[in-house]
Image: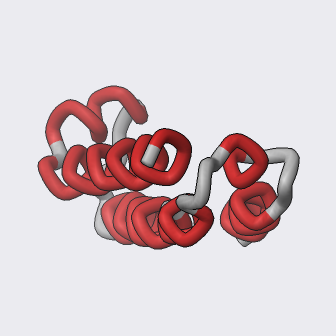
Amino acid sequence: TVSIAAYCLWAFSSSGLLGRSRGGEVFIQLTIVPVVLGALHVLRRLDHGDGGAPEELLFEDRLLQALALSWVVLAVIGVYG
């Protein structure tokens, strides 16, 4: 909860990515969605006993890869778009 709240505060602050954006503030703020969904997905997997090393989860789980890719796309559009 604290990690997600801290990320939300960082995404909405002008000292984070929002300060580097050139009119793509909405896309920077939308990066919160894949972060929250990714955290909830990892917590669900851990609850079911499917946990492991973070890099193993990222390399094996297609949903986490899609969420990471969507975060990168939203961040790049927000900063450079």
- The answer to which of 34 and 24 lies nearer the viewer is 24
Q: Using the rendered image of the protein, determine whether residue 37 is visible from the camera's viewpoint.
A: yes
* Residue 57 point in image, percent of width and height: 29, 40
* Residue 39 point in image, percent of width and height: 48, 62
Q: Using the rendered image of the protein, determine whether residue 50 is visible from the camera's viewpoint.
A: no
- The answer to which of 60 and 81 lies nearer the viewer is 81
Quadrant position of the N terminus in the picture: bottom right
Tell me the quarter of the picture where residue 79 sits: top right
* Residue 7 point in image, percent of width and height: 71, 58
Count of numbered circles on the image? 0
Q: Is residue 28 above or below residue 47?
A: above
- Apparent side of residue 3 relative to residue 44 in the rendered image (left or right): right
- Apparent side of residue 4 relative to residue 12 in the rendered image (left or right): left
Which residue sits at x=54%, y=67%? Answer: 32
- Apparent side of residue 77 relative to residue 32 in the rendered image (left or right): left
Q: Is residue 57 above or below residue 27?
A: above
* Residue 21 point in image, percent of width and height: 63, 48
Which residue sits at x=55%, y=71%? Answer: 26
Q: Is residue 55 above or below residue 57?
A: above
- The answer to which of 43 and 74 lies nearer the viewer is 74
Which residue sits at x=48%, y=47%? Answer: 75
Color encoding of the figure: secondary structure
- Apparent side of residue 39 relative to residue 19 in the rendered image (left or right): left
Which residue sits at x=70%, y=41%? Answer: 20
Q: Is residue 16 above or below residue 60?
A: below
